[in-house]
Amino acid sequence: MNKAFVKEDSGDDDDDLDAGAPEIPAGTKNYITPAGYRRLKDELLDLIDNQRPEVVKIVSWAASNGDRSENGDYIYGKRRLREIDRRIRFLTKRLDNAEVVDTRRQENVDQVFFGAEVTYADGKGDEHTIMIVGIDEVDLDRGRVSWISPMARAITKAKVGDTVPLRTPAGLEQIEILDVHYPPSE
C-alpha cells in the first residue's frame, strides 16, 4: 500500500508525552515524595537499560529479513520503540522538574501539608484516611491523592479538630480533620 494513504503517528509530538498523565499547573513545581521519585527513576532506567535495547534487537533482526512493509516484527517493533521513546521523554521531563519533598524535614507536623497522612470525617461521620502525594503518585485505591486535587487543597494548612469546607459535585460538605501525621519515606 502506498504510504500516502496510510496515516501513521510519528510519535514526535511532545505535547502528548503521556496521554493519561495529569498536567502540572503552570508556574508550580512537580512536588513528589522520595518513594515516588525512586519509582519514576527506576521505570526510566528499566526503559533505557532493558526494554529499549531488547526492542532495538528485534527491530534490527526484523529489518535484516528483507521486505519491511509486511514484516509484523518490524512494524510493531518500531511502534513499540516510539512508545518507549515517548515515555522516556515524559519521565525525563518529569524527573528534571521534580521537587522531592522529604517529610522528615516538616516542621509543622500538626498541620496538613504535602506528604501528610490525614484521617478525616465526612459529613455523614464516615472516617477516611488519605495521603497527599505528587501528581505522578496518585493511587485512589491506596488513599493517595494529588496535592492539586480539590480534597488536598481544601485540607492544606488545617489542623486536628478543624472543620473545613469541601466543594463536591453534590454541593458544599464540611469535613473534620481527626488526625495528621507524616509517615516515614517508603
Image: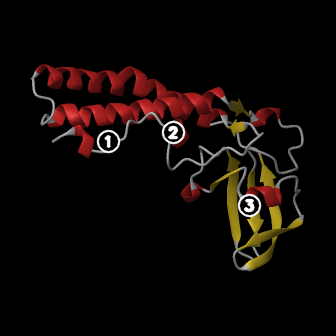
Q: What whole-number distance in Å separates the C-alpha atoms at marks 1 and 3?
A: 38 Å
Counting residues from the start of the chain, the first of labels 3 and 2 encountered is 2
In the rendered structure, which amino acid carries the disc numbered 1? Answer: Glu
In the rendered structure, which amino acid carries the disc numbered 3? Answer: Pro
In the rendered structure, which amino acid carries the disc numbered 2? Answer: Leu
Counting residues from the start of the chain, the first of labels 1 and 3 encountered is 1
Q: Is residue 128 left or right of residue 75?
A: right
Q: Relative to 69, does residue 23 appear above or below in the rendering?
A: below
Q: Kindly identify which residue carries mark 1.
A: 8
Q: Kindly identify which residue carries mark 2.
A: 17
Q: What whole-number distance in Å separates the C-alpha atoms at marks 2 and 1?
A: 17 Å
Q: Kindly identify which residue carries mark 3.
A: 150
Q: Residue at x 24, y 45 (%)?
A: 5
Q: Tell me whether the residue at label 2 lies in contact with that at label 1, contact meaning CB atoms closer than 8 angstroms.
A: no
Q: Tell me whether the residue at label 3 lies in contact with that at label 2, contact meaning CB atoms closer than 8 angstroms.
A: no
Tell which tag, 3 or 2, sits nearer the viewer.
2
Q: What whole-number distance in Å separates the C-alpha atoms at marks 3 and 2?
A: 25 Å
Tell which tag, 1 or 3, sits nearer the viewer.
1
Q: Tell me whether the residue at label 1 lies in contact with that at label 3, contact meaning CB atoms closer than 8 angstroms.
A: no
